[in-house]
Image (spheres, rainbow, N blue to C red):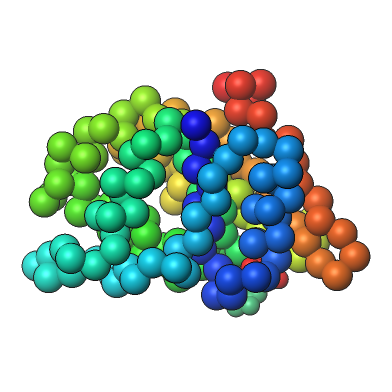
Amino acid sequence: MTALLYGSSREDGNTYKIAQEYKKHHVVDVFSLGTYHITEYDYLHRNEQDDFLKLIDVLMQYDTWILASPIYWYSMSAKMKIFLDRTSDLITIRKELGRKLENKNMAALSCGDGPKVWESFFPPFKLTAQYFKMNYFGDFHAFANEKEIILPALSFLKER
Ligand SMILES: Cc1cc2nc3c(=O)[nH]c(=O)nc-3n(C[C@H](O)[C@H](O)[C@H](O)COP(=O)(O)O)c2cc1C
């Protein structure tokens, strides 16, 4: 089962459109970080009760995670960065959850408004996947604008 998690500064923007396009052709459940209250990493874990661990519990039901983000300044969105930062909770206060990531599949999807691919976008996703011993199956770029929605084939079985 595949979960596509996106983090955009607008709920119905280009990244949302790309996620919906993907859903037309694949069995996938789409989640938006914007619908969760997730605060930035806290060394003292005072935010343990926010939505991060609740979302992780949901995502744990999926063996494949596609993390999709708009490209903001050559990088992932702040929402997605906060999500990735918070995975530090999975190596500190919730180590047993971190270990469960092992062997899950992960890919990153950069969402722009044109075909330009920014290589700077992908390394944090790939390296984080490697850290958790997830199978990283690829860097993908998609784009949407007023005229078109272009999505690469995210067929990870072929890519791996
Ligand atoms: C703050 C900001 C920074 C952006 N930086 C880049 C960039 O570095 N490279 C790029 O190709 N597009 C950049 N864009 C364009 C967006 O990636 C593009 O419009 C994307 O499809 C927006 O998705 P959204 O509607 O989900 O936010 C930027 C847009 C914004 C709002």
Look at the picture and state if 95 lies above or below 32: above
Give the image quadrant in which the ligand numbered 1 is located: bottom right
Residue 84 rendering spot, x and y as whole percentages: 36, 56
For residue 42, say whether it is visible.
no
For residue 139, say whether it is visible.
yes
Along the viewing direction, whichever of 50 and 114 lies nearer the viewer: 50
Identify the residue at image location x=34%, y=54%.
55
Q: Quadrant of residue 146?
A: bottom right
How many numbered discs? 0
Residue 44 rendering spot, x and y as whole percentages: 9, 67
Residue 158 rendering spot, x and y as whole percentages: 66, 21
137 relative position to 101: left or right: right
Look at the picture and state if 92 lies above or below 10: above
The residue sitting at the bottom extreme is: 10
Q: Quadrant of residue 26?
A: top right
The residue sitting at the right extreme is: 147
Identify the residue at image location x=15%, y=41%.
95
45 relative position to 107: left or right: left
Identify the residue at image location x=32%, y=68%.
38
